Image: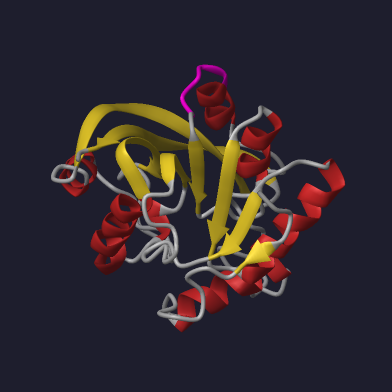
Amino acid sequence: MTDSATSRGAGRTSPPATGNDQFEAAYRGTARAGGMLAELPWDIGGPQPVVVRLAAAGAFHGDVLDVGCGTGDHTLHLASLGHCVTGVDFALSAINTALAKQRERGLRASFAVADACELDGYEAAFDCVLDCGLLHSLPVERRASYLWALRRATRPNAVAHILCLTDRTPPHGTLQPLSEEELRGLFGSSWRVESLTPETLIGRRSGQPTTLPCWHLTARRLD
């Protein structure tokens, strides 16, 4: 494990430039004032309470992938508990912020710039996956590629914990919430859905915390 970012998967087939530019601007603090991404509404200054509860309950094991890790709060929380964890995000600015937090806290974790819909260089590398807020941020047409990349990057019997907004939240900008049927359908072939339960994510709106309905899907990779 290292405290420096790598670029595995970066520079090959990148996410659409417009999406990448939007998130880079958000993490740099240069997003359009008043726009949805201007205040990083998903970045609450620490790990999501649901992730903290999952970790305390022993949900994570082995080599863990935090996919779409943003500024690294979940990666670093899991690292603080002794997990071997790698955080990846396509936004270099987010990874740089995560590395700064890591240096400040003196924790061991790996960070890399990578396209979650490819995850090149991570074949059969992980036993467990955390996706907290990535899936509902992907364009619908990239979901199948994302599921394929997750399968390739994990080992047989790996477990994925997916936290994504439910369709009680209307689509808006980069957000594409999922219905129960959509979520089960995505994971219904090469993964076995073990549980799908309602949960809550914390966000920010106009500087104030807000709660958002989400799904917690637990799926196990089939051989």
| Dominant secondary structure of the residues highlighted in magenta in the image | loop
Q: Left or right: 184 with respect to 142?
A: left
Residue 207 vertical position relative to residue 77 in the rendered view, above or below = below
Residue 57 located within the stretch drawn in magenta? yes
Residue 206 located within the stretch drawn in magenta? no
Residue 199 on image: x %, y %:
42, 29
**Which is more toward the observer, 7 or 14?**
7
Q: Residue furthest top?
A: 57
Residue at (70, 53) in percent of width and height: 2
Residue at (15, 42) in percent of width and height: 188
Quadrant holding the C terminus: top left
| Residue stretch in magenta | 56-60
Q: Quadrant of residue 73?
A: top right
Residue 102 on image: x %, y %:
77, 48
Residue at (62, 47) in percent of width and height: 204
Residue 17 on image: x %, y %:
47, 82
